[in-house]
Image: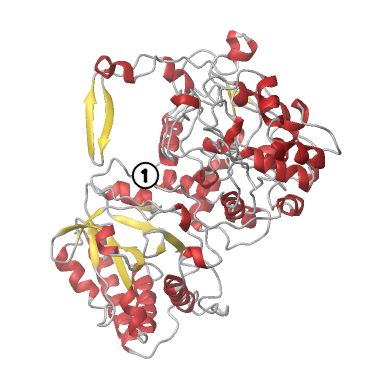
């Protein structure tokens, strides 16, 4: 270790001595954040909605054994922190571990609660933080009565672990950590992240109250016997790390999902911070409550497909961001592939141009494309759809009530579905509260750095516009970013096929045979205008709630936000007609992590209300009418 490293070690050692002495004293605030004037909420009087599955990774424990994080979680309530023992930042790892030590001291006063809880601290400096080093470090914070393993990430899993948990590191030329963004995660017994704390929000009383809230929730009656309070915003079987050798299923029963009908008209009228006023919807007038409810019924009715098997919600899945997280491109009627990714319907009512090639301008008209497409809902004609619905007794009265006595028609069928889709507004994100609401602590430091990159070095805001009072994060224009043209290039010599968790084969395209659809050259806007100048031009998507709407691009070819950022960072395929902004960005790993943190800050809490309401919808099926 050089002189700088020796000095850091001396400082870190002094901090540990001071903090371990403080832990032995009566409890007192660990920092200015921990001694905030805010009073911690009463445990059990509030909900902590799940925000996603806690990623898994391999780690080395204090005995030298290799284990996985999910093994360590052991179906307990987990407080997960990330540290490195050489940290010499007085407000960094030592102070965070000291704060967690105070939380642990509170929990130990309730042995039953302490038994349900486990703290886990993961070092991201495996070269230095050996099992021996971690055992010595742990002695400064860990006390009997609550389990608290200190482990180190394996070097082979380190980059993935840091990306999955949004850890923003700055290192020197030798790889030594100079600074990192402090994050602590609260994870429930089902392995779901329920809260995230930065240095500004790591409060002893609040964290202890959150742990007790999860414990009280676990002792509550089964979901079927109580009023649900914490919906999941993900699909029933999260498969984000399916290709990992330590993949474990996280499937959930349908009965465990929360179903609470919402007043969607009131939600629409109330508006959302960061979004335009609902009265100024670009895509039509404000609907009535009856029209919204009729459209909601139609959206979830499988009888709108030719063979009664698919509904709009089959591809635009509410708990998957109103898109489909599980498929790059959806599967339509009779298993027929759809060549483009299902766009999210969140905030679709504000868009003046629809479909990725902008071939429609109104939601009322747009709905007929999937209804009639042979590989989507598969209906043979407009008349067939209207005649079929006219034969269902419940719809005749509903259309008359919603449209002033008018019978079912092509126009008001489109208007009803559009009415429901216009209520799917979701703003008021952490970014909105910081940018438009003046809440300085709503956005953590990493996301703020990401926004500076978004509007500066990375140049994203040139197309994903941010206004003074609102932001839809799109210019509504069509661009050739150099990514779509790549699909028209020759295929790679081998294809990677995942056949089981952690097991992948490299196969020749010719060996895949009939399982591969013929490569399709998607020319984007040019297929509408027939103008070669429009080749590979696609509409700029909104980035609101983008963390909920994977996979990405018009063909769903990029599975994660990190992959999207990496692709744009590298630049697209240079060719005539490409956007002039197309160029390599030269982002550092820390900058890419910060940019992703900003994009994740665009997720709206209102999505939970919409998902709850969707779960409460009755499903129209063959021979059965929705209530």
Task: Please state the horizontal and vertical placement of residue 306, each as a whole percent of the image.
Answer: 57, 25
In this picture the colour scheme is secondary structure
Q: Relative to residue 578, is residue 234 depicted above or below?
A: below
Between 175 and 164, the one lying in front of the other is 164
Between 217 and 57, the one lying in front of the other is 217
Q: Which residue is drawn at 57% across and 56% down?
A: 259
Between 252 and 282, the one lying in front of the other is 252
Q: How many labels does the image show?
A: 1
Query: Which residue is under mark 1?
Result: 239
Q: Can residue 362 be seen in this view?
A: no
Q: Which residue is drawn at 26% across and 41% down?
A: 501
Q: Determine the secondary structure under disc 1.
A: loop
Specify the quadrant of the image occupied by residue 502.
top left
Task: Please state the horizontal and vertical placement of residue 137, each as a whole percent of the image.
Answer: 23, 72
Q: Is residue 502 visible?
A: yes
Q: From the image, which quarter does the N terminus lie in?
A: bottom left
Task: Please state the horizontal and vertical placement of residue 6, each as a whole percent of the image.
Answer: 22, 65
The crowd level at tag 1 (other Cα within 10 Å; few <14, some 14-19, many 20+) is some
Q: Relative to residue 259, is residue 307 depicted above or below?
A: above
Left or right position of 126 against 412: left
Task: Please state the horizontal and vertical placement of residue 337, each as a whole percent of the image.
Answer: 45, 23
Q: Residue at x 46, y 63 (%)?
A: 195
């Amino acid at each position: 270790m050089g002189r700088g490293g020796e000095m850091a070690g001396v400082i870190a050692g002094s901090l540990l001595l001071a903090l371990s002495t403080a832990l032995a004293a009566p409890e007192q605030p660990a920092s200015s954040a921990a001694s905030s004037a805010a009073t911690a909420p009463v445990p059990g009087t509030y909900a902590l909605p799940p925000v996603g599955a806690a990623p898994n990774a391999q780690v080395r424990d204090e005995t030298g054994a290799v284990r996985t994080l999910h093994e360590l979680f052991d179906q307990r309530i987990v407080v997960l922190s990330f540290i490195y023992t050489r940290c010499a930042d007085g407000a960094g790892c030592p102070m965070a571990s000291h704060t967690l030590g105070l939380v642990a001291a509170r929990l130990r006063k309730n042995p039953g609660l302490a038994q349900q809880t486990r703290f886990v601290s993961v070092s991201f400096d495996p070269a230095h933080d050996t099992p021996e080093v971690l055992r010595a470090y742990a002695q400064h914070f860990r006390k009997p009565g609550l389990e608290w393993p200190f482990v180190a990430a394996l070097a082979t899993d380190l980059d993935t672990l840091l990306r999955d948990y949004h850890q923003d590191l700055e290192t020197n030329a030798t790889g030594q950590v100079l600074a990192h963004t402090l994050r602590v995660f609260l994870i429930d017994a089902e392995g779901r992240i329920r809260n995230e704390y930065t240095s500004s929000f790591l409060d002893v009383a609040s964290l202890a109250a959150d742990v007790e809230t999860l414990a009280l929730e676990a002792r509550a009656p089964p979901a079927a016997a109580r009023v649900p309070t914490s919906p999941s915003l993900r699909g029933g079987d999260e498969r984000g790390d399916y290709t990992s050798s330590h993949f474990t299923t996280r499937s959930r029963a349908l009965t465990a999902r929360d179903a609470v009908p919402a007043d969607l008209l009131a939600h629409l009228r109330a508006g959302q911070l960061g979004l335009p006023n609902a009265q100024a919807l670009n895509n039509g007038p404000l609907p009535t409550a009856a029209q919204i409810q009729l459209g909601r019924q139609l959206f979830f009715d499988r009888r709108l497909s030719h063979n009664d098997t698919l509904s709009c919600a089959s591809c635009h899945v509410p708990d998957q961001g109103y898109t489909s997280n599980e498929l790059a491109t959806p599967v339509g009627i009779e298993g027929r592939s759809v060549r483009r990714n299902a766009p999210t319907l969140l905030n679709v009512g504000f868009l003046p141009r629809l479909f990725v090639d902008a071939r429609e301008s109104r939601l009322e008209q747009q709905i007929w494309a999937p209804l009639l497409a042979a590989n989507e809902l598969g209906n043979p004609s407009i008349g067939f759809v209207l005649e079929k619905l006219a034969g269902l007794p419940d719809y005749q009265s509903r259309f008359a009530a919603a449209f002033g006595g008018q019978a079912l028609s092509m126009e008001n069928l489109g208007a009803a579905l559009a009415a429901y889709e216009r209520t799917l507004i979701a703003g008021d994100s952490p970014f909105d509260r910081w940018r438009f609401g003046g809440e300085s602590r709503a956005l953590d430091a990493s996301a703020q750095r990401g926004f500076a990159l978004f509007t500066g070095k990375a140049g994203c805001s040139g197309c994903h516009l941010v206004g003074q009072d609102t932001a839809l994060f799109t210019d509504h224009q069509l661009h050739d970013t150099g990514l779509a043209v790549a699909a028209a290039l020759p295929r790679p010599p081998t294809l990677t096929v995942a056949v089981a968790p952690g097991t992948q084969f490299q196969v020749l395209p010719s060996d895949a045979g009939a399982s591969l659809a013929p490569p399709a050259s998607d020319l984007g806007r040019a297929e509408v205008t027939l103008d070669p100048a429009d080749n590979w031009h696609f509409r700029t998507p909104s980035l609101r709630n983008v963390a909920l709407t994977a996979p990405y691009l018009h063909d769903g070819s990029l599975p994660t936000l990190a992959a999207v950022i990496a692709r744009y960072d590298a630049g697209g395929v240079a060719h005539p007609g490409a956007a002039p902004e197309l160029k390599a960005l030269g982002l550092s790993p820390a900058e890419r992590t910060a940019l992703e943190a900003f994009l994740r800050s665009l997720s709206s809490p209102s999505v939970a209300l919409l998902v709850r309401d969707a779960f409460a919808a009755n499903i129209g099926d063959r021979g059965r009418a929705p209530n």
